Amino acid sequence: MSHPPLVIRNARIVDPSRDIDETGTIVIRNGRIEAAGADATNQGAPEGAEIVDADGLLAIPGLVDTRVFIGQPGAEHRETIASASRAAAAGGVTSLVMMPDTHPVIDDVALVEFVRKTARDEAIVNIHPAAALTRGLEGREMSELGLLAEAGAVAFTEGRRTIADTLVMRRAMTYARQLGALVACETQDRHLAAGGVMNEGLFASWLGLPGIPQEAEIIPLERDLRLAALTGVNYHAAKISVGESAELVRAAKRRGLPVSCGVSINHLALNENDIGEYRTFFKMSPPLRAEEERQAMVKALEQGIIDVVVSSHDPQDVDTKRLPFSDAADGAAGLETLLAAALRLYHGDQVSLMRLVDALATRPAKIFGLDAGTLAPGALADIVLVDPDEPWIVSEDDLVSLSKNTAFERARMQGRVRRTYVRGREVFAAG
Amino acid sequence: MSAARPIFPFTHRHLLGIANLSEHDIAFLLDKADEAVHISRQRHKKTSTLKGLTQINLFFEPSTRTQSSFELAGKRLGADVMNMSVASSSVSKGETLVDTAMTLNAMRPDILVVRHGSAGAAALLAQKVACSVINAGDGAHEHPTQALLDALTIRRARGRIARLVVTICGDILHSRVARSNILLLNAMGARVRVVAPATLLPTGIERMGVEVFDRLEDGLADADVVMMLRLQRERMAGAFVPSVREYFQRFGLDARRLKAAKPDALVMHPGPMNRGVEIASEVADGPSSVIEEQVEMGVAVRMAVMEALALPQNAEATP
């Protein structure tokens, strides 16, 4: 790195890794943080440093989004690794974990290498591949977990799917445990959820749409937590959506199991009523739930039962969304709205800023073993400067992502990313 | 939906569901349909109300009855009617819907009648085309003209709908007819009951403005109207109910069971019937049955709806 040193002055530094919330200075040299905090203010800038006056902006570790679906390889018209990285930078996400639900599925060393190489050459943020737990995400045969981990897969997941065969799941978890690998899964019983396209309940009944009951998530989650206890694997329930799931994870943690869980920003910010008259941008998996479940998710996040917040960024195009609700694909684009939507919880006094940044950056980095999520001296200088109060309105025209299927179209936001740095290099600056 | 609606004539551009209609809208359409019955019973049935207008019937699901009813209604009003039946392959049906809609839209129709297997299909189409859209059934969501024709049949037989006890029996879960009828009958002040195997009831049914009964005899007690719903063949063989035999035994309407209802109770069925599954022939063809009247009222109600949508003030109105 031949960049000159960088000094960010006069920033409100929030760093959950050191429990710091103070006005201070960040000194960056060779892509790493040399100092960050109030005590760095009097150090004086290094020779030839570029000085940025943050003017009171929030400086937080770059977000670590551990559940991002990208269309490359196979659906590059929806999103490429390069376009996702630009959307990420605009949203303050400096590291993301890419799901293996691609065509072909990322279940092979060569594909992990392809992703890493493409990311190195074309992406402006850090992109880490997660690999398929089973070959082709078919839920039958284990992928080459050891070789995939060696090639750089940071976690194993079944992507949008849940392994139906309990024995296959047990063996994959047992094998992964020996590798010290993380198994990060969504849980949905595909038989119980069969045909379902939204949350089961009165609203679905009036719309005439088949519902997905909460139990479709809870039953396989309970199974996975029992298997985690049996096998000892590091298990991450990637996208829970109901209060009872959070209770199960809390109980498992109390028993000392190495488990954690995440929630998508959609399930913190939206509920089933947002579907309105069959709006397919609100069709997702797990489905948006009732308002009391959304509130339960917020509470569990605040209490730290939910470790991680993800965007679950899932770019879809008109060919998969401009359809009758039942036929439309699941998923919403989310990289660019993740932070602003999360800040609603801060402005609404529901979750502290420290806890939010922890869930968006520090905890996910720790759980997924990434060199990120902290502003401690020596860390990579992945930093976001945020104006926590700036009002703005989401418009698909302004989105960087190749796909415009945002669930926040025309939503009012408070708080916007001003600048994003990856290894001390500016990768995004608001216009 | 909204509480106080001014008592203006009908100002809707589309008919996507009963949920969008007020009590006054419904009464307006039923009054208009009464006039249409009169026209249809004359030797010369053709009027020129819709002369010069083009009506396209776009059916993604086959339905001889509904389609011919709409066709006849349009022709009696003087419209040029075109029928399009689209065989829907499961893979491409969504694409077919919006793409076909855009193609048809370019032909400048005035009224588009749509039947589709997916809930919300009519609403999606209404967003994409420049003409009036009539929902002729979208998945398990709504079938508004069926509920209107049922209401017309009841009102003509009983003089009113308010305070009547109406028992709907059968596959409520998958039935758009049931949803539209529950909405309409509640809007008009009837007391609605449902009877069905628990596997064929939607979640939250007890909060949909109905009283739920487990036994047909109990649900029929002192009923003014009995609506039997069709049970699809593929749902009979163990998935939702154990067998046809058991279904008929527990939920089929025969003359003995019908005695629990009021002596002059009306027996209705949206058709086509499965005789011996949900209804015995002795009842379907018996004196209480108004099933044939329903078919006649169907044409009248569809004439009324098309006429109302074609009113000049509705060209720019909202749905």
Image (tube, coloured by chain):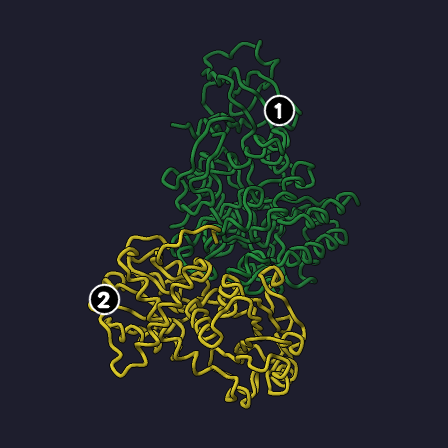
Chain colours: A green, B yellow
Nearer to us in this view, A31 or B250? B250
Q: What residue occupies the far left of the structure in this picture?
A: B52
Which amino acid lies under the numbered mark 2 shown in the image of this protein?
Answer: Leu
Q: In x, y percent, where is residue B140?
A: 49, 67
Mark 2 is surrounded, within 10 Å at the Cα level, by few (under 14), some (14 to 19) or many (20 or more) other residues, namely some
Q: Secondary structure at mark 2?
A: loop
Residue at 56% in and 20% down = A12
Quadrant occupied by the C terminus of chain B:
bottom left
The part of the image, by quadrant, that contains residue A395 is top left
How many numbered marks, from 0 up? 2
Which residue matches tag 2?
Answer: B53
Q: Secondary structure at mark 1?
A: loop
In the image, A219 versus A133, the foreground residue is A219
> The residue marked by circle 2 belongs to what chain?
B
Q: Residue furthest front?
A: B159
**At 60% from the left edge and 57% from the top edge, which residue is drawn?**
A143
Pointer 2 and pointer 1: residues touching (CB < 8 Å)?
Answer: no
Q: Amino acid at mark 1?
A: Ala
Residue A72 visible in the displayed image:
no
Above or below residue B186? Residue A391 is above
Write down the residue under mark 1.
A376
